[in-house]
Amino acid sequence: MSILARLTRVWLTRQLQPFTFKNEYDEKLDFAGCEGLGLYVHIPFCRQLCSFCPYCREIYDAKACDEYIDHLIREIHMVGSRLKEKKHVTSLYFGGGTPALAADRIGEIIAAIDEHFIITEGIGLELHPDNVSEETLTALRRAGVSKICIGVQSFRDKYLSILGRRDPDPAQLTEALKKVQFETVSMDFIFMLPGQTLDDLKADIEMAFSIGANHVAIYPFIDFAFAGSGIEPMRKQEKRKLLDDITLYCQSKGYVRDSIWTYSNKPGSKYSSMTRDNYLGFGCSAATLLRDQFKINTFSVKEYQKRIRNNTLPTSLTLRFTERQRMIYYLFWYAYSTKVDPREFENFFGVSLKKAYGFELWLAKKLGFVTEEDGILRMTLKGAFYYHHYENYYTLAYIDKMWGIMRHDAFPQKIIM
């Protein structure tokens, strides 16, 4: 699979040059003219470090969290003050870690954002089920959070034990969610766990919708080498059948699919920070995607704070895109939504998708990966499976190598992907 994936990358980028991330942290951030700009804030603190989670996180300490947020607010002002006028952005998402542990300071962070940006599509934040209380939800709602995502992972004991998690309390979740209303209440689940069946996932989905969710995300388990989960991954054909069965089940229930892994039982309920033309990331390990570059902040909280105190960007690595590399990056993440609008591609790059990748589009249709309806390219069940297959490979390659290094080296010299 690795050879095929690399050949695919070479073919689609029309060059042998790999994606090369270099230790550069220039102060240049050209986001003034970016359309469809999103914002992301990373808060790395957790009560417990789950083995299946690859993200940048560390054990929660109230004093350390407060100190980190002080620096985070300074970074927001450092970047936002580069523009004289407020910049319109699509959305703001808080991830981690468990950002709800800092519920009492989320309002300060949003206030800092509001000094420089105008958010048009709402604010989302992730929670652990233990954080879903009336007190915490009320604090988040008052701060301006309009969307929440609860990392349930499963309601079933046998899978929670595999993941090292304890049972969430459906009654507690129901009561809190009834008292405090949000535009979107999403719940995350993991599938492709050993022995997991369609009936297991159907029960999780229906439980989520019955206790107050209007959106669910069903993510595949990915066995990151550095995580040391010890969980045996599913075989390829089992994965394909389960993915197809989940999709067909959700379609049969009339749930709206808004990405490769997500469904809602209420039109307009969405939770995704991924499909954005461009985005700015704040906090340790946060990434920034602009027209011609991709930057990643250092994973070290200590070094992140040191950079901020010195009034310099906390960038650890920078990728300078070639035009073709940027096109592939754009298409890869827009395909996550299961559809691509060629008109949006042309608006972004100034060249038609057919001119850039006409043969590949013809081949994708012939192989049954996509169909075209009203000018929009839509992924089929077969296409969704193979997208998952490639996405799984690239996610593993990217995270296993890059994040594995950056967890131990705050500023690596170079990483070649």
Image: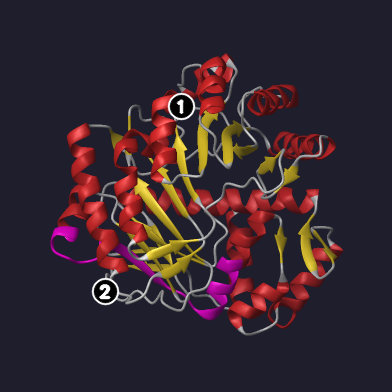
N-terminal of the two: label 2 or label 1? 2
- Nearest the viewer among 338 and 195 is 338
Q: Is residue 293 visible?
A: yes
Residue 199 in the image: above or below residue 336: above
Q: At which x and y percent is residue 378? A: 78, 59
Circle 2 SS class? loop
The mark closer to the camera, 2 or 1, is 1
Q: CA distance from mark 2 to mark 1?
A: 39 Å
Pointer 2 residue: 27
Q: Is residue 80 left or right of residue 228?
A: left
- Nearest the viewer among 386 and 298 is 298
Is residue 159 rendered magenta in the image?
Answer: no
Residue at 46% across, 33% down: 52
Query: Which image quadrant is residue 66 in?
Result: top left
Q: Is residue 1 left or right of residue 38?
A: right
Residue at 57% across, 21% down: 174
Give the crowd class for mark 2: few <14, some 14-19, many >=20 residues within 10 Å: few
Pointer 1 residue: 132
Circle 1 SS class? loop
Give the crowd class for mark 1: few <14, some 14-19, many >=20 residues within 10 Å: many
Q: At which x and y percent is residue 84? A: 32, 77
* Magenta stretch in the rendered image: 307-330
Q: Amino acid at mark 2?
A: Glu
Q: Amino acid at mark 1?
A: Val
